[in-house]
Image (cartoon, rainbow, N blue to C red):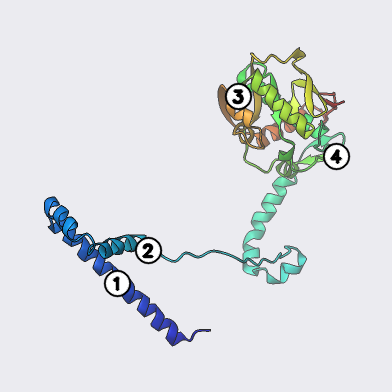
Amino acid sequence: MLSEDYKQYNSLLKLKFNALWLILLFLAHQLILLLSPSKLNQLLKMHRIKLIPLAILLILSTSCNHKTWMINHVLSTKIALDSSTEANADKNYEAYLQPIKLKVDAQMSEVIGVATENMRGHAPESLLSNFSADVYQQAGSEYLGEKVDLSIVNLGGLRTEIPVGNITIGKVFELMPFENELVILWLKGDKLLELLQYFATKGGEGVSGMKMEISNGKAINISINAKPLDINKLYSIATNDYLAGGNDKMVQLAQYVKRINTGKLVRKILLDFIKNETKKGNKIESKLDGRIKIN
């Protein structure tokens, strides 16, 4: 390794060298400013060879860059946040958070409904994705004051399952932890067809208001509200703002003709639906109705 004295000397030498470059550049710039265009042209013709070093000096001085650093190696360690880390906890901070935690836990543990069976999300269709998509379509229709043609929910956005029995507020937060909002958009039939063909390559997604079959990775026998898909028709679709941005490779949804941002959080829509059904004396249930089949 280099000694500290040598490092300091080397740094000082570089500093002096850079200062010299700056001085020479400044003098060259001042010389150019003092000369008229005609005299500068004459000087260039008479001393072309002698001025080559000056040109090189200008090029080199303007091309000097500061040293850049690159990361070429990274080390990381996983630290499990479990009972083994309790000894490292800040007791004062724990005491500060305790009343807040108790309040949040009380809110999250509130039972708002009862599920008749386990609901989880999977392709081609599932109880959970059907339930979620149905709620999307109902909420979109209520917002518009007219029936929305269909709804689309991404299976990857359903982050947990709903087990049979009591449904708590916390469980809905686990299911929908994002701040996604309900969006209603209008999409041409040809773009909708492209989107459904993409769904077919994935084996299905969460939908409501439509049916289709998947054969050899292709979407066939597509119907919207019991009518064959019309590539020239404009369809209204209830979905979330994440998908409406073309995410999850659903790029066609971003090619809408019209879009309405409802400002309603999807999580709150689900919470309100469950609460309202409970008030009516109904339990939360879903069903498989063949909206997406694989041949």
Secondary structure found at label 3:
strand
Q: Which mark is residue 185?
A: 3
Residue type, numbered disc 4: Gly
Pointers 1 and 2 in contact (CB under 8 A)? no
| Residue marked by disc 2 | 64
Q: CA distance from mark 3 to mark 4?
A: 35 Å
| Residue marked by disc 4 | 165
Secondary structure found at label 4:
strand
Residue type, numbered disc 3: Leu
Q: Residue at x 70, y 40 (%)?
A: 176
Residue type, numbered disc 2: Cys
Q: Residue at x 82, y 32 (%)?
A: 126
Residue type, numbered disc 1: Ala
Q: Which mark is residue 19?
A: 1
Measured from the top left, where is residue 115 in percent x and y?
83, 35
Q: Residues within 10 Å of mark 2 (few under 14, many from 20)?
A: few
Secondary structure found at label 1:
helix
Tell me: 290 left or right of 10: right
Depth check, mark 2 against mark 4: the one in front is 2
* On screen, residue 17 above or below 252: below
Secondary structure found at label 2:
loop
Q: Earlier in the sequence, mark 2 or mark 3?
A: 2
Measured from the top left, where is residue 257 in percent x and y?
56, 21
Q: CA distance from mark 2 to mark 3?
A: 53 Å
Q: Residue at x 75, y 20 (%)?
A: 210
Q: CA distance from mark 3 to mark 1?
A: 62 Å
Asked whether 282 or 215 is in front, the reply is 215
Q: Which mark is residue 28?
A: none
